[in-house]
């Protein structure tokens, strides 16, 4: 799974959280999006953990917000899980500047 390609700090705890995400995808509790299905990246904000982009999906009119997390570590991975549970619609493939990406509904 692509999350392993990021700059993950290789602690047991971090791996547990990554496993949680991967299992949730396997069991289809989480949607998984290919990064290449998104285009028209426009930066719309940034927070403590990374940047947020407005993106188009599969060249359709459908827009999503994508949140990127830099320097994946135990703190950010917990934040990713929290965001996925409370506001996310899914997790995205990782390829953008080696960051983890989650996909959210647009609008805050
Ligand atoms: N789903 C979204 N749709 C549209 N804009 C968003 C969305 N999520 C975040 N944003 C924009 O990106 C900015 C940063 O959001 P982000 O969640 O990264 O940080 P935060 O909530 O301000 O703080 P923290 O980093 O502590 O979570 C927000 O202030 C908002 O302007």
Image (cartoon, rainbow, N blue to C red):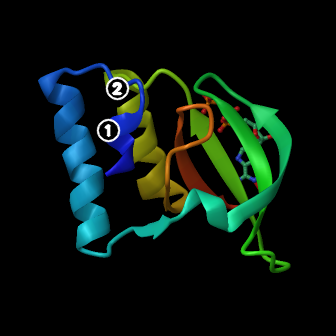
Q: Which of 55 and 29 is in front in this view?
A: 55
Q: Tell me: residue 48, above or below residue 80.
A: above
Q: Tell me: residue 92, above or below residue 10.
A: below
Q: Does the residue labelled 2 lie within 8 Å of ligand 1?
A: no
Q: Tell me: residue 74, above or below residue 106.
A: above
Q: What mark, if any, has residue 8 been given in the picture?
A: 2
Work out which residue is located at the far left of the displayed protein and give it: 12
Q: What mark, if any, has residue 31 been given in the picture?
A: none
* Element assignment for label 1: helix
Q: What mark, if any, has residue 4 been given in the picture?
A: 1
On the question of residue 95 being in view, the answer is yes
For this view, does 101 lie left or right of residue 80?
Answer: right
Crowd around label 2: few <14 · some 14–19 · many ≥20 (10 Å)? many
Instruction: Tell me what residue is drawn at x 30 percent, y 53 percent.
Output: 21
Task: Tally the marks.
Answer: 2
The image position of residue 39, as x and y in percent, is: 78, 59
Q: Tell me, yes or no, whether the two marked residues, 2 and 1, touch with CB atoms within 8 Å.
A: yes
Instruction: Tell me what residue is drawn at x 45 percent, y 66 percent.
Output: 32
Instruction: Tell me what residue is drawn at x 17 percent, y 28 percent.
Output: 13
Q: Which of 46 and 94 is in front in this view?
A: 94
Query: Ligand 1: which quarter?
Result: top right
For this view, does 19 lie left or right of residue 29?
Answer: left
* Element assignment for label 2: loop
On the question of residue 106 being in view, the answer is no
Instruction: Tell me what residue is drawn at x 70 percent, y 62 percent.
Output: 38
Q: Tell me: residue 27, above or below residue 90.
A: below
């Amino acid at each position: 799974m692509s999350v392993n390609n990021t700059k993950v700090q290789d602690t047991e705890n971090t791996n547990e959280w990554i496993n949680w995400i991967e299992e949730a995808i396997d069991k289809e509790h989480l949607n998984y999006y290919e990064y290449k299905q998104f285009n028209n990246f426009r930066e719309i904000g940034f927070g403590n953990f990374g940047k947020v982009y407005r993106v188009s999906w599969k060249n359709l009119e459908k827009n999503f917000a994508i949140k990127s997390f830099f320097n994946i570590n135990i703190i950010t991975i917990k934040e990713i899980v929290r965001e996925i549970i409370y506001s996310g619609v899914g997790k995205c493939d990782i390829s953008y500047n080696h960051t983890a990406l989650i996909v959210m509904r647009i609008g805050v």
